[in-house]
Amino acid sequence: MFQQFISEYGTTILYTILTAIAGYIGIVLKNLCKKYLNDKTKKAVAKSCVQFVEQVYKDLHGPEKLEVALSAAKEMLAEKGIECTELEMRVLIEAALASFNDAFHSEDDENKEEEIEFDPAAEYEITDGENEVPETTE
């Protein structure tokens, strides 16, 4: 009787179990992808909001800029249907701001290194369209 049951319903039971396992794996993968994409979207929104606030609200400082960025980010994420806590958004905005400031300061450092020191007391000769800096004799 058991062998008859297995022979009649064994493949159906096996297909049912495999379908359930495949469905579970699909749900897990979907949730992982959704979490990854949501995190990526949150970071992109935070970066965009920081750039927006830095460019548009030059007259605001510190906490006021942060509040504008938080409200803009909250609104943008709500439009996309992504939930985000106040703390998480604050952390993402602060991280984006730190990245923005690091890039800004490294750019300033590069420009300072490229600057040529100008000595008004030195005489410059122009040859072949290039400035030559004479050796200073004291």
Image (cartoon, rainbow, N blue to C red):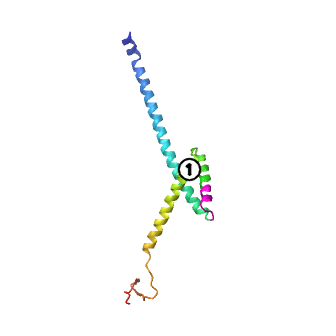
Q: Quadrant of residue 124?
A: bottom left
Q: Residue at horizontal 42%, vertical 73%?
A: 113
Residue 48 rendering spot, x and y as whole percentages? 55, 56
Above or below, comparing residue 126 to residue 17 in the picture:
below
Residue 58 rendering spot, x and y as whole percentages? 61, 64
The residue type indicated by label 1 comes to Met
Query: Any magenta on residue 64?
Result: yes
Q: Main secondary structure of the magenta part?
A: helix
Q: Residues within 10 Å of mark 1 (few under 14, many from 20)?
A: many
Q: Nearer the viewer, residue 70 or 8?
A: 70
Q: Tell me the element at label 1.
A: helix
Q: Residue at horizontal 61%, vertical 49%?
A: 75
Residue 89 rendering spot, x and y as whole percentages? 56, 50
Residue receiving disc 1: 89
Q: Residue at horizontal 40%, vertical 15%?
A: 8
Residue range in magenta is 59-68
Q: Nearer the viewer, residue 6 or 34?
A: 34
Query: Any magenta on residue 124?
Result: no
The quadrant of the rendering that contains the C terminus is bottom left
Q: Viewed as shown, does residue 60 lie left or right of 32?
A: right
